[in-house]
Amino acid sequence: MYSGRSIFLLIFAVYLGAQTPGQKGEVKSVKDDYTIGAGDEISVHVLDSQDIPEKAMRVDPDGRIALPLIGRVEAAGQSVSALETEITRRLRTYIKDPQVSVNVTDSASRPVSVLGGVNAPGIYQLGSEKSLAQVIALAKGLAPDAGGLIRITRYGGGDGESDPAKAPVMQVSVKDLLSNSAMAGSIPIRANDVITVPKASVVYVIGEVVKPGAQTLNDRESITVLEAISAAQGVLPVGAPQRAKLLRRDPRTGQRTEVALNVKHIMSGKGENLVLQPDDILLIPRNDARAIGLKTVDAAIALGTGALIYR
């Protein structure tokens, strides 16, 4: 099942897909919108002409197609309507008033990669122009553990860059996207773009709480001790929040350090409501429990304590 915001994004993308604005609010033709590329498969139909059979053909790696009567025609880089116009112009030498129709039967030249926190990561063909929301919808929406930012790395073509080290990167807030922000919703995705949805930061609440486990921050930047306890549905009667421990990883050594934390005071308003950092572990021990070693805690997390999605 998809999360609430994934379903919202899918509906939002369908709405965007129904609106393809052109100049002055007019609707663009797909034939004007799609740019043919090398590797695409197209068919050319000329009304009442036996000289040019209607059959599918691949655009050559050099971007051309070969047709009877007129020979090789430059196809890559042109819109469908522009190619129709060019074929019509060249056929007038042989056919009176030719009626030409070009269709793209297989789009294989406009890949976009969607990676990370989506429900169906992979490589998708753009076909006609699509917005960021529409491409995320192709990947079945955001996963429950998706973070709050989406990165778009632009490779090749236009203002793109083939050198990965120099490729421009845009960042889009998921919150802006879901709030129907005009800027976020209208960002066009181009061929060879890489869309990365980093997974959200995680904190853990384990021990004597109703629902122990990992809590993903999604589009939140932080979570406090009280919010984490609330998301874990509170401390059990056998818990000893006054003897809680905060286990935080030292960025220099990578090892966890243990800090005593009186969560009972925090819950009663007598202590500072600390902000938890990504990868923090908040441990609520039992009233009669002996000390729990850090190795035991790490083993419990490695085995999995159940995912709790914080909203």
Image (tube, rainbow, N blue to C red):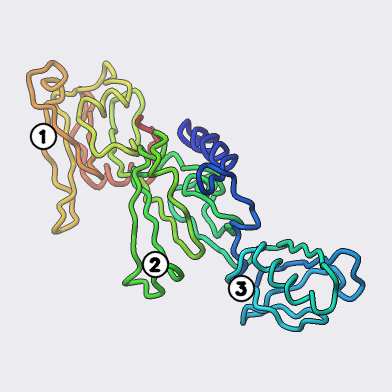
At 20% from the left edge and 31% from the top edge, which residue is drawn? 224
In the picture, the quarter occupied by the N terminus is top right
Q: Is residue 94 left or right of residue 110?
A: right
**In the figure, 113 relative to 91: above or below?**
above
Under circle 1, the secondary element is strand
Say which of marks 2 and 1 sits in front: 2
In the picture, the quarter occupied by the C terminus is top left
Which badge, 2 or 1, comes first in the chain's sequence? 2
Under circle 3, the secondary element is loop
**In the figure, 55 relative to 296: above or below?**
below
User: Which circle marks residue 159 in the picture?
Assistant: 2
Instruction: Note whether residue 306 is visible.
Output: no
Q: Is residue 232 left or right of residue 49?
A: left
Q: Quadrant of residue 305?
A: top left
Instruction: Note whether residue 37 is visible.
Output: yes
Spot occupied by residue 73 in the image (x, y as percentages of width and height): 69, 79
User: Label 3: few (<14), some or many (≥20) within 10 Å?
Assistant: many
Residue position marked by numbered label 3 in the rendering: 76
Under circle 2, the secondary element is loop
At 85% from the left edge and 68% from the top edge, which residue is drawn? 54
User: Label 2: few (<14), some or many (≥20) within 10 Å?
Assistant: few
Which badge, 2 or 3, comes first in the chain's sequence? 3
Q: Quadrant of residue 93?
A: bottom right
Spot occupied by residue 268 in the image (x, y as percentages of width and height): 13, 16
User: Which circle marks residue 260 in the picture?
Assistant: 1
Q: State the CA–CA distance, disc 2 to disc 1.
A: 53 Å
Q: Are marks 2 and 1 in contact (CB under 8 Å)?
A: no
